[in-house]
Image (cartoon, grey):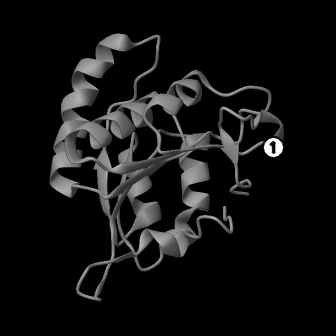
Amino acid sequence: MSTPDAPPQAIADRSGKGATRVKRILAVASGGGHWADLCRLYPIFAGLDVAFVSVHRSYASQVSGHRFYVMRDVSRHDRWAIVVLIPQLVRVVLKERPDVVITTGSAPALFALALAKLLVRAKTIWIDQIANVEELSMSGSLARYVADVWLTQWPDLKSRRGPDYWGAVL
């Protein structure tokens, strides 16, 4: 996924002393298609300090060499799981102190964006999963309230009020 307005290199930061500091990135996605979309973004993370968060410990092998955390999967049908998820994400966000949190969606990822914005004032990027062809996911619709960059992977879902379309991750 790329755009002339926000190339992946824009994640690097210049401090006031002229030195380049690599920003800390937290990449979050639940399982299945959300994780697959996030893995398709893997090349843009080259040379960056990235930690990954997902719902299956087995995914850690796909991002070896990076820090990896497991979070509880939640959905609107299993709201009590949020009681487990929130403390997990608070610990990860406070330990990692990311500058940027990027996700390809899911309910747990929406909580991660909100907590990172609240706790460490991270910049947040939501990319709605490519499977959401006709309409945004419920979490994707709610992401407008916590995402600094709110994206869809389908040009037909772009609107003046958002989300934006910068391309697909495929």
Q: Residue furthest front?
A: 16
Residue at image location 29% in from the left, 89% down from the top: 18
- In the picture, measured across the screen, residue 71 lies left or right of residue 42, that is left
Q: Nearer the viewer, residue 137 or 8?
A: 8
Secondary element under disc 1, as helix, strand or loop, is helix
Identity of the residue drawn at 34% across and 34% down: 114
Eyeballing the image, is 165 above or below 1? above
- Dividing the picture into quadrants, the one containing residue 22 is bottom left
Horizontal side of 119 relative to 31 (left or right) equals left
Query: Residue 45: x percent and y percent?
Result: 48, 70
From the top left corner, tell me how far across and down residue 73 is, in percent. Answer: 39, 29
The residue closer to the viewer here, 141 or 72, is 141
Q: Quadrant of the N terminus?
A: bottom right
Amino acid type shown at disc 1:
Pro
Badge 1 density bin: few <14, some 14–19, many ≥20, Cα 10 Å: some
User: Relative to 24, is 144 above or below?
Assistant: above
Count all numbered tags in the image, as a single digit.
1
**Which residue in the structure is indicated by mark 1?**
155
Quadrant showing the C terminus? bottom right
Horizontal and vertical percent position of residue 16: 25, 80
Residue situated furthest bottom in the rendering: 18
